Amino acid sequence: MALTAARRLLLHAGSRLGRREAVDGARRFANKRVLVETEGAGIAVMKFRNPPVNSLSLEFLTEFVISLEKLENDKGIRGVILTSERPGIFSAGLDLLEMYGRNPDHYAEYWKAVQELWLRLYLSNLTLVSAINGASPAGGCLMALTCDYRILADNPKYTIGLNESLLGIVAPFWLKDNYVNTIGHRAAERALQLGTLFPPAEALKVGVVDEVVPEDQVHSKARSVMDKWLAIPDHSRQLTKSMMRKATADNLIRHREADIQNFTSFISRDSIQKSLHMYLEKLKQKKG
C-alpha cells in the first residue's frame, strides 16, 4: 500500500542520512517535512516543517514516524522535544485533503497512519516534551496530548484543543480516552461536543497544557523541564509510563481494524464529504 511503499523509500533515504550524520558528528538529520537536531545531554528536537500549516499529511505522518524510530533506536537519545520550525503554527491538524474526494482505500491507509503516529508517540519510551509555539487545533492537539509534558507560548492566538465537531467530524474513541485522561471526563465531554479551542490561560486552567510561558522562553523552558525528567532513572520512569498508559493504548490495538473501517465508512458518507467541501471552500475564501 501507499504508506508501506513510502516507508521503504524513506528508510532508504534515512540510511543515507545516517551515514552523513557520522561524518557531520551526528548533530542533525532531516527529510522534507521533519527536521531533527540533537542538543547534547541525550536530547533531540523534532521540528515540524510541512508548510504552510504543518498539516498531518500522509507524507508527514510517514516521515515523522520514521524519524521517531531513528531516535528510539539511538541509545544516546533519552528525550525529544516536539516543536514547529515556524512559530505561529504548531500544527493545524489532520490534512483535510487526505479525507476529501479520495477512495476508501486511501482513507483506510491514511487513518492507519494517524493511528500509528498516536501509538508510537503515546507508548514511546522516550521522554517527550511539546514546546507548543503556535496554534494547535485537532491533530496538533493530538500530538501534544501524547507528550509527558506540554508547554504553550503565552499568545492569545495560540489556541489548543480538539475542535473536530466544528468540522462535522468526531474525534476517535482512543483520542477521546487520551483527552479524558488528561483533563477529566466532564471537561472533555464539554470540550469535545463544543469543539473548544482553549487560549493559553484556559488551556492551563483545564489541564490541556502543564505550563504557559512567554513566547521567547518556550524552548528554554522545554530544555529545563527535560533535564528534570531525565534526572529520573529511565527504567523506573518507562515502567511507570507504560503502567499508566497501557490500558488506553491496548483499547485501540484491540479494535484497530474496526476503527479503520468505522473511519472509512464515516468519512465516505455524502453528508460528511459535503461538510468537508463546505469547510474547504471557506478556507479558500479566507485565503482569497
Image (cartoon, rainbow, N blue to C red):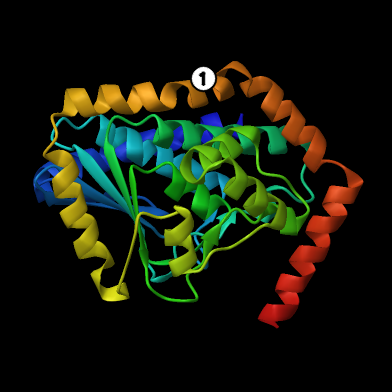
Total numbered badges shown on the rendered structure: 1
The quadrant of the rendering that contains the N terminus is top right
> Which of the two residues, 103 or 187, is positioned nearer the viewer here?
187
- When asked about the image quadrant of residue 103, the answer is top right
The percent position of residue 154, horizontal first and vertical second, equals 38, 73
**Residue 187 x %, y %:** 58, 49
Q: Indicate the quadrant containing the C terminus: top left, top right, bottom left or bottom right.
A: bottom right
Above or below, 39 against 155 in this view is: above
User: Which amino acid is tagged 1?
Assistant: Asp
Q: Is residue 231 visible?
A: yes
Look at 28% across and 66% down and name the residue there: 218
Q: Residue furthest right?
A: 270
Instruction: Give the residue furthest to the top.
Output: 254
Q: Report which quarter residue 196 is drawn in.
A: bottom right
- Label 1 sits on a secondary structure element that is helix
Query: Relative to 86, is 252 on the left or the right?
Result: right
Outermost residue to the front: 186
Dot 1: within a 10 Å radius of its alpha carbon, few (fewer than 14), some, or many (20 or more) residues?
few
Which residue position is annotated with label 1?
250
Q: Residue at x 45, y 46 (%)?
A: 145
Residue at x 22% of width, y 48% of height? 44
16 vs 11, left or right, is: left
How far across and down, in percent of the image, does residue 219 sit?
24, 63
Q: Position of residue 254 (x, y in %)?
A: 59, 16
Residue 124 versus residue 132 in the image, above or below: above
Q: Would residue 8 be visible to someone looking at this image? A: no
Q: Would you place residue 125 above or below residue 10 in this image?
A: above
Where is residue 55, by image quadrant? Answer: bottom right
Q: Is residue 137 rendered to the left or right of residue 132?
A: right
